[in-house]
């Protein structure tokens, strides 16, 4: 198990492969972000974006799914306090395939003896290597229990 | 129609409310955030959180839903977002919590290249006890008032 003490500033991870479908874009948008450019093909064509795009929060949700599947196994993470500097850089469209590159930026000891916070910068890219979203997550890691190796 | 020009610094908006059910928490988490404290009520009891809690990304999604509805009520010409400065999940969100939202405009500035402007605002979601569960500073883009309308107003 990888604890707070084991995380190294500068270490990098690459993970995830998420195929974005039209159906899922529409399903998420209907439930959480019913704006025309996420919901309606014709209205989206006439919008700033020139076609249907995923809700930015949907891209965030796909990111956390890739984190759950590809990053946190074997890590003593217990959720996150939040994030900073989230940028939606390029539209995400039906047929895009997303993946993640992450880098540990900083470790914050904090006041709690049992947890520490790790700042991890992640870039989510599409199949052309274009970064579509980036953010700095504040991930909570358990500290190594005393006596365990 | 409410355009970028119509937003004023300090202006506040009350978002509507949403009661989050256990079924919603489980459905969202199984699709997007399958960590045991979001997907398994029994495992969640033994976790740090002492019971099932909603994914933070689910709370944000509900904030978005309430914001879209508020924009619709105000007929605001919202046209997406370049991102957020910060988001903090301050308190757990649990089944049957009733979430409400409030926003305050912090800053506005025009785009140099497009007929839009930006509004930076603080957004808070609160539970039925008045605790802030998520605090966000985010940016929204709005269309500018067309020149003809400007001349006529």
Image (cartoon, rainbow, N blue to C red):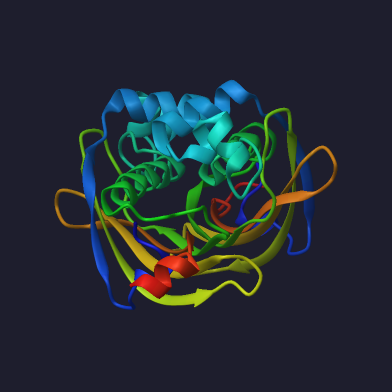
Q: How many marks?
A: 0
Give me the residue at 21% from left, 50% from top.
B127
Q: Can residue B35 be seen in this view?
A: no
Residue A145, given in percent of the width and then of the height, sits at 54, 51
Q: In which quarter of the image is the C terminus of chain B?
A: bottom left
Residue A103, given in percent of the width and then of the height, sits at 74, 57
Residue A85, compared with residue A17, is above or below; it is below
Looking at this rendering, what residue extends furthest in the left direction?
Answer: B129
Residue B18, given in percent of the width and then of the height, sits at 23, 39
Quadrant of the rendered image containing residue B95: top left
Q: Is residue A8 visible?
A: yes
Q: In which quarter of the image is the N terminus of chain B?
A: bottom left
- Name the foreground residue: A76 vs B61: B61
Residue B27, given in percent of the width and then of the height, sits at 41, 23
Residue A34, compared with residue A84, is above or below; it is above
Give me the residue at 42% from left, 55% from top.
B77
Give me the residue at 31% from left, 39% from top.
B50
Does A70 sit left or right of B45 as displayed? right
Quadrant of the rendered image containing residue B17: top left
């Amino acid at each position: 198990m990888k604890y707070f003490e084991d995380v190294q500033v500068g270490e990098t991870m690459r993970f995830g492969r998420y195929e974005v479908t039209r159906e899922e874009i529409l399903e998420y948008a209907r439930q959480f972000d019913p704006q025309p450019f996420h919901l309606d093909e014709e209205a989206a064509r006439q919008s700033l974006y020139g076609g249907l795009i995923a809700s930015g929060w949907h891209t965030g949700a796909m990111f956390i799914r890739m984190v759950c599947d590809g990053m946190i196994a074997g890590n003593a993470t217990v959720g996150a306090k939040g994030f900073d500097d989230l940028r939606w850089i390029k539209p995400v469209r039906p047929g895009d395939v997303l993946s993640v590159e992450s880098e540990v930026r900083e470790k914050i000891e904090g006041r709690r003896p049992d947890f520490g916070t790790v700042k991890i910068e992640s870039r989510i890219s599409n199949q052309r290597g274009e970064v579509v979203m980036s953010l700095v997550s504040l991930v909570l890691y358990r500290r190594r229990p005393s006596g365990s190796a | 129609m409410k355009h970028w020009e119509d937003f004023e610094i300090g202006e506040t908006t009350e978002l509507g409310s949403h009661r989050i059910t256990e079924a919603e928490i489980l459905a969202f988490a199984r699709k997007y955030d399958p960590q045991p404290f979001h997907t398994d009520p029994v495992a969640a009891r033994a976790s740090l959180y002492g019971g099932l809690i909603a994914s933070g990304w689910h709370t944000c999604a509900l904030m978005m839903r309430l914001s879209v509805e508020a924009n619709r009520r105000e007929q605001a010409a919202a046209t997406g977002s370049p991102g957020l400065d910060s988001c903090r999940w301050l308190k757990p969100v649990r089944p049957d919590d009733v979430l409400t939202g409030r926003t305050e405009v912090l800053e506005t500035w025009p785009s140099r290249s497009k007929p839009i402007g930006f509004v930076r605002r603080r957004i808070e979601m609160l539970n039925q006890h008045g605790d802030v569960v998520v605090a966000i500073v985010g940016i929204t883009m709005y269309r500018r008032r067309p020149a003809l309308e400007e001349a006529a107003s």
